[in-house]
Every structure is written in C-alpha cells, then in structure tokens.
Image (cartoon, rainbow, N blue to C red):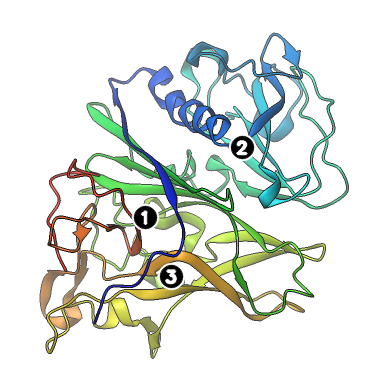
Amino acid sequence: MGLPTVTKTWQFSINNTRFWNGDVWDRRWVPWTIKNWLVTNGWTVRRSSNSSTVANSDLWASLGNLAYNYGYNGNSSYPRSWIVLRAPSALGSAYDLFLACSSPNGGGSSGCGDLLIKVCQAGYNLDGNTYTHPTAVGTDQYLCRYGSSDGGNHGGRYGVGRYDWGYTYRLHMMCTSDQKQFRIVICCNGYAQGIWIFERLDTVEAPTVWTEPVIANIAAIGNINTSDNQGASNNDPFIAGSTQYSSAWQAGWCKSNIGRALINGQAVGIYFSSEYIASDPMAVQYGVRNELTNTWPMYPVGVAVGDSGRRGHQGMMTDMWMGAAGISNHNAGNSWWGVLDGETYPSDGSRKFVQFGNLIMPWTGSAASPVSTPCYVY
C-alpha cells in the first residue's frame, strides 16, 4: 500500500509549548495562541472585549486580557472577554469565528477555562459590549463548542481533553497556502487530545446545492481517559454510538458527529467517513499492518451528513487520512495495536505525514517530537 500524495502546500507552526503549573492563565494560553496564529495567517480581528473595554480592534494583547467572569452563554450579569475573527475570503466573504470566555463554574481568577465557540458564515454585527455578545447577521450562526454543557467533558475546554498540573500543552497549527484549510491539534500530557478545523472542501458531491462547502469542527480527539489517557475503548471520532466510549472525558460530542456546517441555510452535523467493515472502520476492525505489504493503512476521509434533507456522502477532506490509532482491542486478543500519537510516516527520514488519534495529516519533516518520543513507521 503506497503512501498517498499531498495535494496542497501546507504552512506550519509546530511544537508551540506551555507548561501548566495550575495557574488559570496557562489554560488561557491555548485560545490566545490560536488567535495570534490565525491573525498571522489571513484572519482579522473585527471586534473584541477584554472585559473592561470593547473596540473594533484586537484587545487580546496578552493573557491578562482573557477574563473569565461568569459569562455563561451570553449571561449579561458579569463582564467577560470575547473576540470576533473574520476568516480569509477563501472560507467565505463574511465567515466569522466567535470566541467568548464564558465560564459558568467560576469567575475571575478561578475561571474554569471553558470557551464558547461559534461560527457565523454571514458574519457578526459590530455591536455587543463587555456584558453582551455581538449579534449574528441572519440566522446562520451555529454552535461549535461549549465546554460545560456536555456533562463535564473536559474535552469541551478548547477541545483539549484532559489536563492536569505538571503537564505541558503542545500546539501544532497548519494551513494551506490558498487559505482554504486551517487545522489546529492540541496535545497535552503526551497525547493528541483536541482538534480545531475550519475548512472549505475542495471536493463536493453537489456543488450547485452546497454552494459554500465550509465545515467547522472543535472536538476532542484520540486517546483521552480519566485514568491513563489511553482508555480501553475505541476512542476515535469516527464511530457513532455511546458504546464506543467509557466516559465523558474520552470524546465528548464526537460520538454524535464531529463537525458542523451550513448547507443552504440548514445547519447540519458532519460525520467523517471511511472504509467500513460491519459497524467499524477498517482502521479499527483491522488496525494492524498489512500482512502482505507490511504497511499501515491510510484511508481517505469523507464528509457525510445525516440530517433530513441533506443526508448522504457530501464530499472529501483535503490531505487527511484515517489510520489505525494505538487503541485497546481486547476482542482481537491484543493489549494494544495501531499507531501511537505523534508517529510519522515514512521511515526514510522524510516524515511527510503525522498521526494524531485516527487522523493522519501532512507533516513538516521535523524530527522534533509532536507529542512524545515518536516512532517512524511506513
């Protein structure tokens, strides 16, 4: 099984790290760093609040500007920080990302770090103040992520999964030169635990119907567990059904769908699809090396929709593949199988691909560890 071809030119900012010593400001480093990277890659700040001032400019100049007062989903009782980012035109003429420091479980210095994340493809009005969020233009705003509304799933907090004192966050951020694909992988405690995706599909089944084929995804990823951050189930975002998850920490909303999109005014849930045998993807059902070629599987990732009126396979992800994650599979008689987080392909030193959870994406060729000491596989 030969390696696939990377079709786009990718730009990277990898191994951005910060050690968390228990200070809440360390957790705020995640969205602040992501904001800074987006701005350097074609996104612009339209309006923001630092909890004391609002302006049509970037007021998130430092971590101290991200104030988590009790701003639960727009509750106007307390001031809080928020920001509106306009995407490059390749994602749409008015595609806005909205982030708000909204923390129902704590305020001020004890904010728990939840982040309200929304997308509006028609943009946001330049209103709102330190107490109220800006309003969306039209009705095409949809919620990507809110941390505390999913039964305490810490994956909701930036989509990073578990965090704890004494661990280091590591961010890998990548985008294409044509600014159609933006991906952020968040690692903590030696594992890939969260992923953000904002992408325009290059391959669409019905482009005359889905005229703005842009998807948004904020989710937990990979092997997240309360005890050992690995878990005893198939903790991948491709499998629907709660039986695949042993706790809320593992994959959060991914067991329903992995992303959101707007198809001609209708907000829909996005599933990532791949080759299946019975109820499991090939990479899970046979997550081992090919016994004839000695190669690991790399399957293209499709986009499927299950919502009424939009059901069906609707397109393909660009330069993304599904692989066999390092997971427990007791039915196969193996304690672990698959490829561990941070392993790169191929073994000739070129390191063209990297694997996070079940997702395989282009890599820089860097030998620096993406999450922990990587193995080089082919």
Tell me how far mark 3 sits from mark 1, CA to CA: 13 Å
Identify the residue at image location x=49%, y=65%: 318
The quarter of the displayed image where residue 359 is located? bottom left
Quadrant in the picture for the N terminus: bottom left
Residue holding disc 1: 250
Tell me how far mark 1 sits from mark 2, CA to CA: 20 Å
Disc ID at residue 66: none
- How far across and how far down the image is residue 232, in percent? 23, 64
- How far across and how far down the image is residue 286, in percent? 24, 82
The quarter of the displayed image where residue 271 is located? bottom right
Q: Label 3 sits on what residue type?
A: Phe
First in sequence: mark 3 vs mark 1: 3
Q: Label 2 sits on what residue type?
A: Leu
Asked if the residue at tag 2 contacts the one at tag 3, i.e. Cβ–Cβ closer than 8 Å, the answer is no
- Kind of element beneath mark 3: loop
Horizontally, residue 345 falls left or right of residue 17, namely left
- How far across and how far down the image is residue 291, in percent? 12, 87
